[in-house]
Image: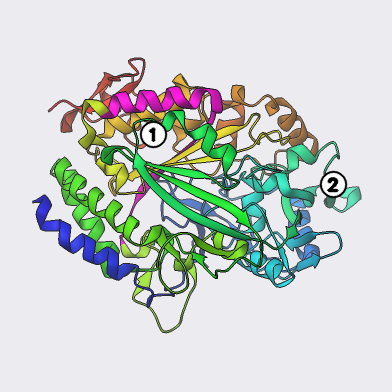
């Protein structure tokens, strides 16, 4: 069966990433309202991590700071629960979902995106919180300047990326986290009736509340504006060096120290690792390249449906070899096209040199065209294409080697069991510098992202379910990793309060700015207050709990709660059929 899918999948990947398909059908808006039933808030993947719908009484769309102030004041006056959502909504946990009662409102920043003011003399840019990252970058580049740090995915708003600790990859300078390049921001918070029920708090770096507000999770108020530091425009030069993975756990420190924007992608089933040699070069260096990462390119709807269908067949028939064939084809294709790097129109060879604004982030699939309705982002939920989990863990640099050693031990028991993750770009390794933000990284960190298959049916166990549960528990419990705030399954947040030295200071700031808990929600209550999760039948299948009994898995389908194979303290749902 595996060989049957190799050629079609490889061809679909080529077709899906053809330069002719530059634009895509616009993503669906994250908020949909019905006059009779209220509003539903979704994320871009069509499913929150708990699978439940987020319904709210109403949604407001301020277009200015005054209108934003009025919206918060109205909510405060009427004692409504409030959450903010951007026009993108790419968070996986329910950060943007208020409590499900009738007394809630969502403030969307989708139309609050007019101001992008570059101050060339001060080397700063100030933007409304709803401004999209791509619009911000292009405005900065037009002024002959560059924004140094940005996440790899550009489909985010300025307010959203600041709130969640979004980052690129660098231990150099101010580091990779965008919030560490913020020099000022404004929050709209509730206030007593005598002060108009809401007020604007303007903070500069060094102010007592700044380190809480710079990564706030939407719990302190609604971000109004953000001011970021800039640098003179520069270019970057990128080369991917593919090597055997035998010693990469001994090389990552040296790689990060030698190259300003270094990262590493590990393909464990293929025993391959790609070192990204990524450095700043002078603006007059020859080259007009673009980073159009293959995973973020426009994909033919038919292609994403076909790829998902093949993956589903492999998963449900327990065809590990089928996933390995497609993983090998995927890696070969990425090598062929430079992982989406383009020297001009296509990839013609390394190094690829281009302006910072074209090289630091990507996401061409989200840009719309009225004439192209045949392609979208591959995960667009309207098309039933790719559907996956994403786990992201921040490690102490000193502990990262031990994590990789453990993963290799698990991999070596049966390398084929890791093919599923290699269909999703393997394990991406990036570098994030120590931050002063209370919910930023408290030490120089190595961050690992990996995506893996998610079933449409929450009660359906997955092929190699136990492997990824063991890797997840290795990361967050054995090696003490910290979760990315905007990603991860619920399991990753267990005990997170103990992993940030500034957590208590953040809670104190939350109580000061929002004493009535207007911006709190069930998700934040779980994260802030901790506590044991309620365990129900099947709760471990979706990462809502760690199994302790077989019923937390799926005994009727042969999945029982078992110890980990390498990390024996782990408890995972393993097929014992």
The magenta stretch spans residue 385: yes
Towards the viewer: 356 or 486: 356
The residue that label 1 is drawn on is 543
- Relative side of 506 to 497, left or right: right
What residue sits 53% from the left and 54% below the top? 152
Which quadrant, please, contains the C terminus?
A: top left
Q: Is residue 255 above or below residue 163?
A: above
Name the secondary structure under disc 2. strand
Q: Position of residue 569 (x, y in %)?
A: 36, 15
Give the image location of residue 232, x and y in percent. Answer: 74, 61
Q: Which residues are magenta?
A: 384-411
Count neighbours of disc 2 (C-alpha within 10 A) and say few if under 14, some if 14 to 19, many if 20 or more.
Answer: some
Residue visible at 63% across and 68% down?
135
Tell me if residue 463 comes above or below residue 297 in the rendering. Answer: above
Residue 388 forms part of the magenta stretch: yes
- Farthest residue, direction top: 569
Residue under pointer 2: 204
Q: Residue furthest bottom?
A: 371
């Amino acid at each position: 069966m595996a060989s049957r899918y190799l050629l079609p999948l490889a061809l679909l990947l080529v077709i899906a990433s053809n330069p002719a398909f530059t634009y895509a059908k616009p993503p669906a808006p994250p908020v949909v309202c019905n006059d009779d039933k209220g509003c539903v808030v979704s994320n871009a993947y069509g499913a929150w991590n708990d699978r439940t719908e987020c319904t709210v009484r109403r949604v407001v769309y301020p277009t200015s700071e005054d209108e934003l102030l009025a919206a918060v004041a109205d909510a405060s006056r009427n004692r409504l629960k409030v959450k903010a959502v951007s026009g993108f909504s790419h968070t996986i946990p329910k950060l943007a979902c208020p409590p499900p009662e009738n007394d809630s409102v969502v403030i969307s920043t989708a139309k609050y995106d007019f101001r992008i003011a570059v101050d060339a003399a001060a080397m700063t840019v100030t933007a409304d919180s709803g401004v999209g990252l791509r619009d911000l970058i292009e405005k900065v580049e037009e002024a002959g300047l560059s924004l140094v740090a940005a996440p790899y995915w550009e489909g985010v708003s300025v307010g959203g990326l600041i709130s969640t600790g979004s980052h690129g990859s660098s231990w150099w300078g101010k580091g990779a986290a965008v919030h560490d390049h913020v020099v000022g921001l404004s929050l709209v918070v509730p206030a007593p009736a005598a002060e108009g029920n809401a007020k604007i708090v303007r903070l500069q770096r060094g102010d007592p509340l700044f380190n809480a507000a710079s990564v706030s999770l939407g719990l302190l108020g609604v971000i109004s504006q953000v001011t970021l530091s800039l640098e003179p425009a520069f270019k970057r030069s990128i080369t991917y060096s593919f090597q055997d993975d035998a010693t990469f756990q001994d090389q990552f420190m040296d790689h990060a120290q030698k190259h300003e924007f270094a990262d590493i992608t590990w393909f464990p089933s293929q025993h391959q690792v790609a070192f990204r040699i990524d450095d700043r070069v002078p603006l007059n260096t020859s080259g007009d390249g673009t980073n159009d990462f293959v995973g973020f390119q426009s994909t033919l709807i038919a292609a994403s449906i076909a790829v998902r269908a093949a993956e589903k067949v492999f998963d449900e028939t327990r065809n590990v070899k089928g996933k390995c064939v497609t993983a090998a084809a995927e890696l070969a294709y990425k090598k062929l096209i430079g992982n989406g790097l383009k020297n001009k129109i296509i990839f013609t060879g390394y190094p690829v040199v281009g302006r910072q604004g074209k090289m630091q982030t990507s996401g061409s699939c989200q840009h719309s065209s009225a004439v192209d309705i045949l392609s979208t982002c591959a995960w667009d939920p309207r098309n039933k294409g790719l559907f996956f989990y994403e786990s992201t863990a921040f490690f102490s640099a000193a502990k990262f080697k031990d994590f990789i050693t453990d993963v290799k031990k698990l991999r070596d028991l049966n390398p084929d069991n890791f093919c599923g993750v290699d269909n999703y770009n393997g394990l991406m390794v990036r570098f994030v510098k120590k931050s002063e933000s209370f919910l930023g990284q408290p030490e120089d960190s190595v961050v690992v992202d990996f995506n893996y298959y998610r079933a449409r049916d929450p009660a359906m166990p997955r092929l190699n379910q136990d492997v990824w549960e063991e890797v997840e528990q290795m990361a967050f419990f054995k090696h003490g990793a910290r979760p990315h705030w905007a990603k991860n399954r619920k399991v990753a947040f267990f005990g997170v309060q103990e992993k940030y030295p500034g957590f208590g200071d953040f809670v104190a700031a939350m109580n000061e700015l929002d004493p009535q808990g207007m911006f709190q929600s069930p998700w934040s209550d779980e994260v802030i207050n901790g506590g044991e999760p309620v365990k129900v039948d099947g709760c471990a299948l979706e990462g809502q709990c760690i199994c302790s009994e077989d019923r937390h898995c799926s005994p009727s389908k042969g999945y029982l709660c078992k110890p980990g194979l390498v990390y024996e303290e782990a408890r995972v749902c393993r097929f014992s059929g």
